[in-house]
Image (cartoon, rainbow, N blue to C red):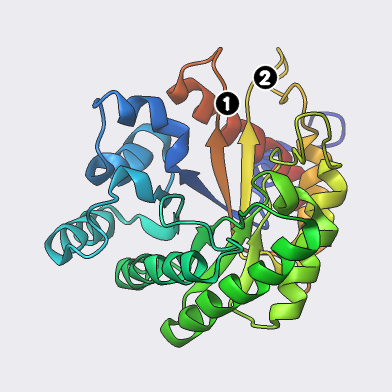
Amino acid sequence: MLNGWSAECLMAASARKMFFEISLAEWSLHRTLQAGKLTNMEFPAKAKTDFGINAVEYVDQFFKDKANDQTYLSELKKRAEDLGVRNVLIMVDTAGPLADLDETKRKQAVESHYQWVDAAKFLGCHSIRVNLRGKGTADEIAKSSVDGLGRLAEYGRKAGIGVIVENHGGYSSDGKWLMQVIRQINNPYAGTLPDFDNFKLTDTAVYDRYLGVQEMMPFAKGVSAKARDFDEQGNEVTIDYDRLLQIVKKEKTPAFKGYIGIEYSGNRLSEDDGIRATKALLDRIGQRVS
C-alpha cells in the first residue's frame, strides 16, 4: 500500500484512458523535411516507429505537387494502413487566400482547395485545415470569409470532408470574429481547429488564448497542441496545458473526443525531443483531466 493506494489502483490510474487521441502534425518536423532528411511518404512510419503515435496530420507544402497524383496518394495511403496509422487531416497553406476581397482571386482560391478536399477524402482524413486571410477591414474580411469558406465548406459537405479554420494570425485569431463567420456560414462541415498558441492579432496585440480556445471549441473538429519549450518539470513554459485541456474537455457539446495534434515549434530541443516532451505532457495531464 502507498498512501492508501494499492499497486493495482496505481496501475489502473496510470492507464486511465484519456478523453482524446493524440496525432502528430507534420509541421513538428518541418526542419527535418526541409533539409531532405525525411519525406512526406516516410512521415507515417516516423510517427509510429519513433514516437508511438498512430495518427498523422499532413501539411500540403510537403507534397504540394501530389494532390492529384493517384499513384502517390495510393502508396501513401497503403503505407499508413499497413502501419495502422490513421490519416487525420491535411493542413492547407499554399492554395490561396479564401478571404481575398477580390472575387476572382477568392474564387480561384476556393477552387484551388478542391483538390485537397478530394485528396483528404481519398486518404481517409476527416478534414482539411484552412486559413482565412485577406487584406481589409474586419467587416470586409468577414464578408469575404463567409463567401469563400462557405463555398468551400459546401464542396466539403458533398465530399463528407470538414473544412476547419485554425486561428493563424490576424482576424482569424480573434475568437469572437471567427465564431461570427462560422455561425453565418451555418454548415456543419465548416468548423475550427483551435491552436493553443496562434493568437497574435497584430505586431503588438495578442488575443487571450484561453478565451479564444473556449470560444472556438463548440465548432472544433480537432485541436492543435502547440509547444515551444519546457521547464524542468516537463511543463510548457508559457502555455497552461492543464487549463487548456480542461477547456477542451468542457467547452464542446457533445464532449470532445477527437484528436489533439502535437505541433512542436521550438528551437532549444531537437524536433524529435520536442515531440516526445509534448506527448509526455499531453499524456500526463490528459490522464488527470479525463
Residue at position x 70%, y 61% in the image: 141
In the picture, measured across the screen, residue 172 lies left or right of residue 247, that is left
Residue 148, placed above or below residue 25: below
Residue 152, placed above or below residue 44: below
Q: Quadrant of residue 92?
A: bottom left
Label 2 and label 1: CA atoms lie apart by 8 Å
Q: Report the disc number at residue 167.
A: none
Circle 2 is placed at which residue position? 230
Instruction: Name the residue type under label 1.
Output: Ala
Query: In this orientation, which residue lies closer to the viewer: 136 or 89?
Result: 136
Q: Position of residue 40 (x, y in %)?
A: 28, 43
Badge 2 vs badge 1, beta-carbon distance below 8 Å: yes
Instruction: Name the residue type under label 2.
Output: Phe
Instruction: Say whether disc 2 or disc 1 marks the residue closer to the N-terminus.
Output: 2
* Quadrant of the frame with the N terminus: top right
Q: Report the disc number at residue 277.
A: 1
Residue at position x 29%, y 23% in the image: 35
Res. 9 in view: no
